[in-house]
Amino acid sequence: MNLKRQLQLDTETAMREGDTNRRDTLRMLLAAIKQEEVDGQVELDDDGVEKILSKQAKQRKESIIDAEKAGRVELIAQEEAELAIIEQYLPQQMTEYEVRQVATIVIAELGATGMADMGRVMGQLMPELHGRADGRLASQVVRQLLQD
């Protein structure tokens, strides 16, 4: 079963169970998917849906940071709850250690020696980490490895 259909079925289940938070979050995700399909005039496959979900998760993480700075506890709780639901549909994220291992291999393969090679390293690394690691984390790890 494809990811979009799973979201639709889970929305129906949440409606039957009266889980309003889950229902509303899944509806919001389906709306974002539909908007992307209408804008691009395409039917998204699982990879396209996953990209939308990743973008939505990233937005929640940024909102949590902003809400923490503003001291808005109720907003933090809401965004964290939505993020938890979104992450259930995304692939398991890699740890910093796992990203470091992959980055070390890529750096060795390319013979990268300093910060001037960061673009080449990231260009090769990100497709390998696709959907499994945050770009910000990957950038941070590569920067540390190239500076050492």
Image (spheres, grey):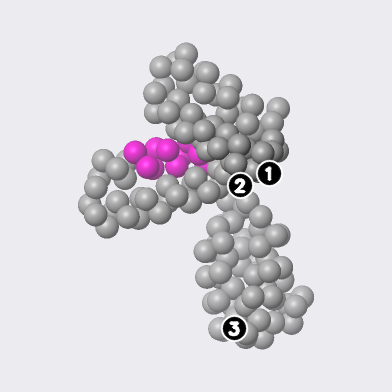
- Which residue is drawn at the image coordinates 58% and 24% (left, top)? 8
Question: Looking at this view, is 70 or 102 the one in front?
Answer: 70
Distance from disc 3 to disc 1, alpha carbons, whole Å, reads 31 Å
Distance from disc 2 to disc 1, alpha carbons, whole Å, reads 6 Å
Residue 97 lies in quadrant: bottom right
Which residue lies most toward the right here? 109
* Lower sequence index among marks 3 and 1: 1
| Amino acid bearing label 2 | Lys
10 Å crowding of disc 3: few (<14), some (14-19), many (20+): some
* Lower sequence index among marks 2 and 3: 2
In the picture of the structure, the residue carrying the numbered disc 1 is 47
- Which residue is drawn at the image coordinates 41% and 22% (left, top)? 19
Compared with residue 123, is residue 131 higher up or lower down, i.e. above or below?
Answer: above
Q: Magenta part of the protein: which range?
A: 78-92
SS state under label 3: helix
Question: Looking at this view, is 145 or 129 the one in front?
Answer: 129
In the picture of the structure, the residue carrying the numbered disc 2 is 51
Image coords of residue 87 (percent x, y): 52, 41
Q: Is residue 60 left or right of residue 32?
A: left
In the picture of the structure, the residue carrying the numbered disc 3 is 115
Say whether residue 119 is magenta: no
- Can see residue 89? no
| Amino acid bearing label 1 | Asp
Distance from disc 2 to disc 3, alpha carbons, whole Å, reads 29 Å
